[in-house]
Amino acid sequence: MNSLKTIFRSLLDEDTLPARDDFMPRDIQVDWMPEKATILTGVRRCGKSSLLRQVRSDWLEKGLELSHVGYLNFGDERLSGLQQKDLSLLLEAFDEKCAETPSRGEQSLLMLDELHEVKGWELFVNRLLRQKGRAVYLTGSSSKLLGAEIATSMRGRSLSYEIFPFSFDETCRFLKIDQSSQAPKARAILKNQFKYYLSRGGFPETLKASENTRLRVLQEYFEVLLLRDIVERHGVTQIPAVRFLFTLLFGQIAQLCTQNKLHERMKASGHRVDKTLVGECLKWFEDCFAVFTVPMYSESFSKRSVNPKKAYVIDTGLAAHVNMGAAQNLGRLLENAVYLQMRRRENQIFYFKTKSGKEVDFLTIESNISAELASARKRGDITLTQVCLELDNEETRKREVSALDEAMGEMGLIKSELVTLDTRGEIRVQNGTIQVIPGYEWFSSKR
């Protein structure tokens, strides 16, 4: 017991949190409320721990004096096998460290990284929140931290935020690329950087690395996602089959998929597995924020459930590295990047199919799906978005535009948008207007 407390004391160190000059502030605004735990969750290596450092700095910049700060990463191998009862020693260790240094304020800050690895952690956090004068921040790499089960177990005492790799805006700031200048040279640099962003992605560690190092880092990310967040977390025994499916989905971004078709692909490749494993894998992939699926839009829940879904992945750079098929299709990488940006904006996301079978890549709703559609239209909460790399080909242009026009008519909308690599304009159609927007402008947080 004492040895474990000693480990806690050695790991609880605010000095691991650098000054603001040592990291780049993110676009996401993380709020705090008394008696609520703030939860930051997302894929590994997307910058959650750095965001904790930003949170600490924000507290100080707002003039809020902190009595003490503690940060602990439960991914440390010395804490492997930790149980809920052991967490009391963590609290004792933190209180002892606080008692050894003068208080600088009334509020202490306790930040716990990957605490969800400890079964029953929610009860411990609830106990922390009952104690006055302590702000609690948690991070994790499991989507269960966003789910209804957490809201239930935490008794409504949490605020959750989903964190992603860098957006295009954040990438430009990190690389010190000017997005505001209209000078021809600056615009050319921006456009070129956007292409790089689509093929290289937004994981912070990779942005300034050499090409060889970047590829090694991405391979490591892929292996950690597969082996630690899927195989180890869920006790997987059929590792080759799960690896095949994981890799397959990284090559099928922005394409329709069903459990049956994925199962058939696995059988055709020699993986004799039960179809239920495919369904379980899809849940595991989404749980660790690696793969996402988007349903077809319908007011009927059953129709959304039974129709094929479109698959997207957490980072276009990782997709391009894992599967050559994805790397060679810049249009699908663009669509995947658009999807991720919609997630950052916290929209509800669907794809749309017209009555004649034409497909629109995205229908997004800012308000809840249960809200009355007429009210949502009036407020401008519904948006139809098509993604097309370029419109030079007349057949492609006609297909994309006609799908949007037909969908606008069925949804009663007079505006929609078409995101491209580098084309700007306005297209008048029977049911309204389509705004054609270059990707490097559509991704701007200032839109």
Image (spheres, helix red, strand yellow):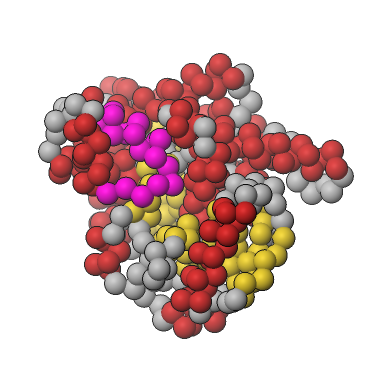
Q: Nearer the viewer, residue 59 or 373?
A: 373
Above or below, 160 against 82 in this view is below
Above or below, 430 against 61 in this view is below
**Residue 208 coordinates in the image, percent (x, y):** 63, 26
As for residue 389 lying within the magenta part, the answer is: no
In the visual, does 240 lie left or right of 325? left
| Residue closest to the far top | 212
As for residue 252 lying within the magenta part, the answer is: yes
Question: In terms of secondary structure, what is the magenta stretch mainly?
Answer: helix
**Residue 379 coordinates in the image, percent (x, y):** 55, 78
The residue located at (63%, 67%) in the rendering is 434
The residue located at (36%, 75%) in the rendering is 370
In the visual, does 72 lie left or right of 419? left
Above or below, 193 against 120 in this view is above
In the visual, does 287 lie left or right of 241? right
In the visual, does 87 lie left or right of 310? left
The residue located at (79%, 43%) in the rendering is 187
Q: Nearer the viewer, residue 196 or 51?
A: 196
* Quadrant into which the N terminus falls: top left
Above or below, 382 against 229 in this view is below
Residue numbers of the magenta segment: 241-258
Q: Would residue 27 be seen by someone viewing this image from the given angle?
A: no
